[in-house]
Each structure stands twice: as C-alpha cells, then as structure tokens.
Amino acid sequence: MLLRTIVLGLLVYPLSGQAINVGSITTFIDAGAQDVAKEIENNSDQARLVTISVARISSPEEGGVTIPMEINGELLLSPSRLMLPAKAKNNVRFFYKGPADAKERYYRITWLDTALSADEQRQERRQAVATTSAQIGTILVVTPRQHRFDYAIEKGVLVNRGNASYRVVAYGVCRDQPGKQCRETYYDLPGKRRAFKRVDIHHEKSHLGLWLGQEFVVVK
C-alpha cells in the first residue's frame, strides 16, 4: 500500500514484483532507543544478494539533499551485506551513535538487491557476479534525544510545533460525502502545517490522534 508519507521524493525500483521485502518505507529510532532492526524477506525462489548503504539527508521530503555526517560512525549498521536464500528472512540492525541533542536527523537507506544463480551462490564469497534487479530506498528518522512534543490546531489546520516528527491519524465523516467514512494518515515533520482534505475534523463524529514513538495522543 502506497501512502503519502514524508518520503515524497523517494523512488522505489520496481514497485511491483520485487524480490525482497524491506517492510515499512519509514522507520524510527525513538528518543529512548539507540537502535532499531528491520526485517527483510526474500519472497522469490532464487537466492538474493543484498547490499545496504546509508546516507544522511537534509530532509526526507522532496528537495532533500545528501549532507555530511556530523561525526564518524554516526549511524552504523550490521550487516551491510548478506545473502538471503529463497523464501528466507533476516534482520538488519541500525545503531545511532550521533549527538544526543534536540535535532531530528534523517537518513536514506539504499537496498541493492541482486539475483544469484546456483553457480554464483557457490562462488559468492570469491566474487559477486550478478545482475542488478532492484534498488529500493527507505527512510530512517532519528528522533531527537532531547525531544519536545507540541502541537496546535489553528482554524482546522494541525501544526507541529515540536522538534520531532509524529504520525497523524484522522478518521471520521468525509468532507465531500457526509454519509461515508474517510481516513487520512501522514508523517509530519517539525513545523509542518497539515490541512485535511478528506476528513471533516470539525464534525463531532470525526477523530484525530498523533503517534509519537509508542505514545498515542488523542487530539479530538
């Protein structure tokens, strides 16, 4: 399912028929944690070689650019390369070792997926001769170690006044079809102003909530 999330400018190749499944597009390392694991799964009948790389970006939205890490070893991962047999699963873990300040940080995770033939599987330790079949991009968000959660509703517009991203869930009566139920879900960065297009949040039967890490806050 494709959601309009904070990764508006991210490309995934290909969207259909990809061999590996890397789970959710957006992953968080919450303020109280130093690491997170992502499970990857090989859904194909052929072994896959997966190579993972990390780059820091200025923003996960369209227009975000690659920027330098602030310190060496700011974000580590293990393993960075693995072979997945057919129908197999494995975990890749990411470790945040950067500053414990009030800044939210964003990283692009690139998963390079290549197919291995039976002969190549036997020789994989000596040479990686394979044909690239997919490159998948996901986003890792590191919540500020000193996070401040704050929001406001101004004339029906939700404003993130804190320093950390949160997940917005709005559901209830549709704006254009009052007899039906609608739902909207977003990831909102600090400073984001969110106007709802489908859900009439002013209606008494509509609801609005925010996820910040494992905490759910009922707004309405």
Image: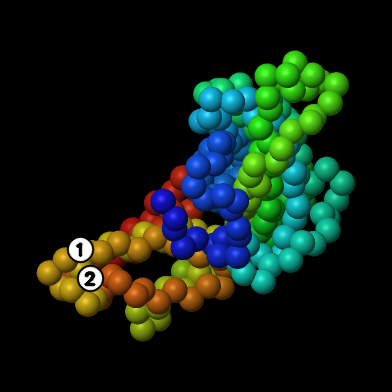
**Mark 1 → mark 2, Cα distance in angstroms:** 5 Å
**Residue indicated by mark 2:** 174
Q: Do the residues labelled 1 and 2 touch (CB within 8 Å)?
A: yes
Taking the spot 28% from the left edge, 70% from the top edge, the residue there is 199
Q: Position of residue 127 (x, y in %)?
A: 84, 26
For numbered disc 2, what is the local secondary structure? loop
Name the residue that disc number 1 marks. 181
Disc 1 on helix, strand or loop?
A: strand
Left or right: residue 202 versus residue 83 is left
Compared to 71, does 41 lie above or below?
above
Quarter of the figure that contains the C terminus: bottom left
Q: Is residue 141 above or below residue 40?
A: below
Residue at (77%, 61%) from the top-left corner?
Answer: 66
The spot of residue 180 in percent (x, y) is 16, 66
Q: Which mark is residue 101?
A: none
Which residue is rendered at x = 52% and y = 50% of the image? Answer: 15
Note whether residue 146 is visible. no
Q: Residue at x 51, y 65 (%)?
A: 188
Report whether residue 199 is seen: yes
